[in-house]
Amino acid sequence: MSGYSASVRPPERITAKEKLASMAAYGDGGSPSDFEYDHLVSLELGGAANDPRNLWPEPGGSPNPKDSVENALHRLVCSGQMSLAQAQKIIATGWIAYYRNHEQPAQVSPSTPASGTPNKPISDTNCSDFPTHDAAQRWFDQHGGSPSSDVAGLDGDHDGLACESLP
């Protein structure tokens, strides 16, 4: 439905205080204008409009790289090429990896992977590709992994630690 996001988005007079509280909770310093108070699962992908668990202080302004992923996933869902549940999982746990694999501008070359890392697309990478937790963690960190971004599904409990079962 065109215009849905605008019809349910909470006004800034409501979210301004919440943004400051979220910045404090995430340990983000600096000016609130340096952050967008953004939905982890975007409204266009069915995210909750004013649930604090779905809102976070995203560094940078708008538009940003996450916006292009939200738009691409929305198009895929609306065209029937992807389920809504899959799009929500990607945006909640792996949008950075999706951006790097699908949306990143062509003129930006990816960094050369560190020695001993999987030589395959991020979407095909899993814990069995690493000999140790330390190797997986280095790869995870290099690819933008964090408690809020589970790159390649290596951090199932969203604590920022990849492949904890490895030696």
Image: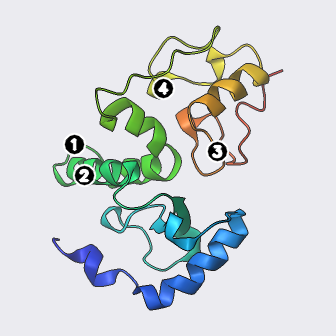
| Residue 107 screen position, x and y as percent | 30, 26
In this rendering, the answer to whether 72 lies above or below 24 is above
**Secondary element type, mark 1:** loop
71 or 130: nearer the viewer: 71
- Calculate the distance from the C-alpha at mark 4 to the C-alpha at mark 3: 15 Å
Q: Mark on residue 81?
A: 1
Left/right placement of residue 126 relative to residue 111 reads right
Mark 3 in CB contact with mark 1 (< 8 angstroms): no
The amino acid type of the residue labelled 3 equals Ser
| Residue 11 screen position, x and y as percent | 39, 87
Mark 4 closeness class: few <14, some 14–19, many ≥20 residues within 10 Å: some
Mark positioned earlier in the residue sequence (4 or 3): 4
Q: Which residue is mark 4?
A: 122
Mark positioned earlier in the residue sequence (2 or 4): 2
Mark 4 in CB contact with mark 3 (< 8 angstroms): no
**Secondary element type, mark 4:** helix
Q: Mark on residue 77?
A: 2
| Residue 17 screen position, x and y as percent | 58, 85
User: Closer to the observer: label 4 or label 1?
Assistant: 4
Q: Which residue is mark 3?
A: 146
Residue located farthest toward the right when viewing the structure as drawn: 167
Mark positioned earlier in the residue sequence (3 or 2): 2
| Residue 134 screen position, x and y as percent | 78, 23
- Calculate the distance from the C-alpha at mark 3 to the C-alpha at mark 2: 26 Å
In this rendering, the answer to whether 63 lies above or below 20 is above
Left/right placement of residue 159 relative to residue 19 reads right
Q: Is residue 35 visible?
A: no
